[in-house]
Amino acid sequence: MPLRFTPLMKKRLTRRARFMLQTALRLFPELHGKTLTVGYTRAHLGSALVPRHAEAELTIRLKVRKLSYNTIGHELTHLVQGLSHCQYDREIFTGRIPSGEKPCDIWTLARSELFCDDAPTYLKLPPAVREHWLHYAKAVRALCIAAIEKRATHRLYIAWLEEQIHQLARRSLEQNDHEMQLQLLF
Ligand SMILES: [Zn+2]
């Protein structure tokens, strides 16, 4: 898909960031054929202009330093989120992504393991999960996929998901305690 970089981004863009962007975009078939403008931000990890109609210009901004796939995925998901609410494009989207930051985090992680390289920003995570994110990432992603399925019948799917993640951390702690006790015994 055609990429356009703003002058400021052209100055900052690294080979690594360009590669990451192109790799991430392959996982967003809904955006193929559209032109994406990529700008630079220093203030946030990233931001997106959520499109309000199908022909809207698509723009995201990224911080290049410590750029993660999770951030790129989150901002691209905002674009899909906006487009999925546009009447015209609804057919090519597998479903509407609910508005808001937490759904954006959930749908980003669910889309691909690629986006598990860093913890999501808005989803409520116990400190242990945030601190040891890579240890929990796959399990949290599986829970995100389950939460999206759950949403069909369960209005409070985000609360359900956050509770599941909470339990995940607790079970892991108990297991560690158990292993520690065994080590003390033998
Ligand atoms: Zn966001």
Image (cartoon, grey):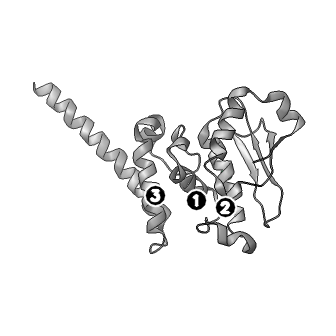
Q: Residue furthest left?
A: 186
Percent x, y of residue 7:
89, 35
Q: Secondary structure at mark 3?
A: helix
Q: Amino acid at mark 3?
A: Ile
User: Would you name the residue on which mark 1 appears?
Assistant: 103
Q: Residues within 10 Å of mark 1 (few under 14, many from 20)?
A: many
Q: Secondary structure at mark 2?
A: helix
The quarter of the image holding the C terminus is: top left
Q: Is 47 on the left-hand or right-hand side of 146? A: right
Proximity of marks 2 and 1: CB atoms separated by less than 8 Å: yes
User: Would you name the residue on which mark 2 appears?
Assistant: 81
Percent x, y of residue 80:
68, 59
Q: Amino acid at mark 2?
A: Gln
User: Would you name the residue on which mark 3 appears?
Assistant: 145
Residue at 83% x, 56% y is 57
Q: Residues within 10 Å of mark 3 (few under 14, many from 20)?
A: some
